[in-house]
């Protein structure tokens, strides 16, 4: 059982126990544990594209906090406790749709990268010695496709800073970046010269509507 699931079960039990009569110290204890618990759940959901649970847990943490207390009265608090318990239980059993990006990538994702790869597929992608290169390419394309522009620029600059090795996998990675840049910015700092050579225009920085170059000195990577 994952820590998040244990936390949700613990909070559910404590909140339902609040429906019974306890001394004041117990309710203060539940407030503190609830604030910490809901805060942790909110933090775990902060990078989720569906932000609903993030806001639900964040508001819950603020509402239950023991320092700036919200006075609702016993009856209303009991209703809120039941609602919280219901949400926690629902979130435990909520099923998330999983997509296997390697077995059946969607056409909208596969098509752009297949177009650019078709020009160099024979030499850089699919061959008998490296049957998993297409999977490698599609995996990194999916991983980067939904990143925000500033993150794409940051990762690309890190790759440039690390240095160019000329290894086949690095070239494939740069091809992925080339497609990502075309999809997001309609231009790319990467130039595919031929089947063995790629030019990079060095580091870039994000502008209001696109990106620009820190310097325009080309870096060249040639496949070994």
Image: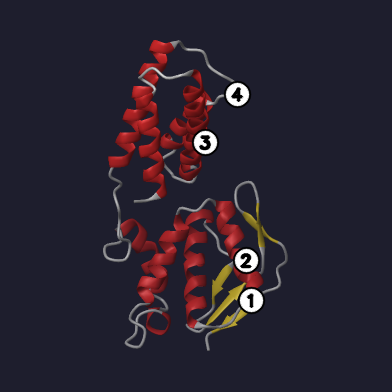
Assess disc 1: are there few (<14), some (14-19) or many (≥20) residues with their C-alpha within 10 Å of its C-alpha: few
Disc 2: which residue: 158
Q: Is residue 21 above or below residue 149?
A: above
Residue 201 seen anywhere in this rendered image of the structure: no
Q: Residue at x 64, y 76 (%)?
A: 163
Task: Say which of marks 2 and 3 sits in front.
Answer: 3
Indicate which disc residue 163 carries: 1
Task: Measuring from the top left, give residue 16's x and y in whole percent.
Answer: 35, 26
Instruction: Indicate the quadrant where residue 101 lies.
Output: bottom left
Q: Nearer the viewer, residue 110 or 120?
A: 110
In the image, is 106 to the left or to the right of 136?
Answer: left
Q: Nearer the viewer, mark 4 or mark 1?
A: 4
27 or 123: nearer the viewer:
27
Could you tell me which secondary element the residue under label 2 belongs to? helix
Other-residue count near label 3 (Cα within 10 Å), few / some / many at <14 / 14–19 / ≥20 = some
Disc 4 target residue: 67
Q: Are marks 4 and 1 in contact (CB under 8 Å)?
A: no
Q: Nearer the viewer, residue 144 or 80?
A: 80
Q: Are marks 2 and 1 in contact (CB under 8 Å)?
A: no
Choose mark 3 or mark 1, whichever is in front: 3
Which of the two labelled residues, at mark 2 and mark 3, occupies the earlier sequence position?
Answer: 3
User: Closer to the N terminus: mark 4 or mark 1?
Assistant: 4
Cα distance, mark 3 to mark 1?
43 Å
Label located before the other in sequence (2 or 4) = 4
């Amino acid at each position: 059982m994952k820590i998040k699931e244990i936390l949700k079960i613990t909070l559910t039990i404590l909140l339902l126990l609040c429906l019974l009569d306890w001394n004041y110290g117990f309710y203060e204890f539940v407030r503190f544990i609830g604030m910490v618990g809901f805060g942790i759940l909110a933090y775990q959901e902060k990078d989720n594209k569906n932000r609903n649970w993030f806001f639900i847990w964040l508001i819950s943490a603020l509402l239950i906090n023991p320092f700036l207390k919200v006075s609702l009265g016993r009856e209303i608090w009991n209703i809120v406790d039941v609602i919280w318990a219901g949400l926690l239980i629902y979130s435990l059993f909520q099923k998330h749709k999983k997509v296997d990006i390697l077995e059946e990538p969607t056409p909208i994702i596969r098509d752009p990268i297949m177009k650019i790869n078709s020009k160099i597929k024979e030499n850089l992608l699919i061959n008998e010695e490296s049957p998993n290169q297409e999977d490698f390419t599609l995996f990194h394309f999916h991983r980067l496709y939904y990143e925000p522009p500033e993150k794409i620029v940051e990762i690309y600059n890190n790759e440039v800073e690390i240095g160019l090795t000329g290894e086949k996998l690095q070239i494939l990675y740069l091809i992925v970046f080339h497609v990502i840049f075309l999809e997001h910015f309609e231009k790319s700092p990467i130039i595919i010269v031929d089947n063995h050579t790629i030019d990079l225009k060095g580091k870039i920085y994000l502008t209001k509507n696109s990106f620009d170059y820190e310097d325009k000195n080309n870096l060249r990577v040639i496949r070994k």
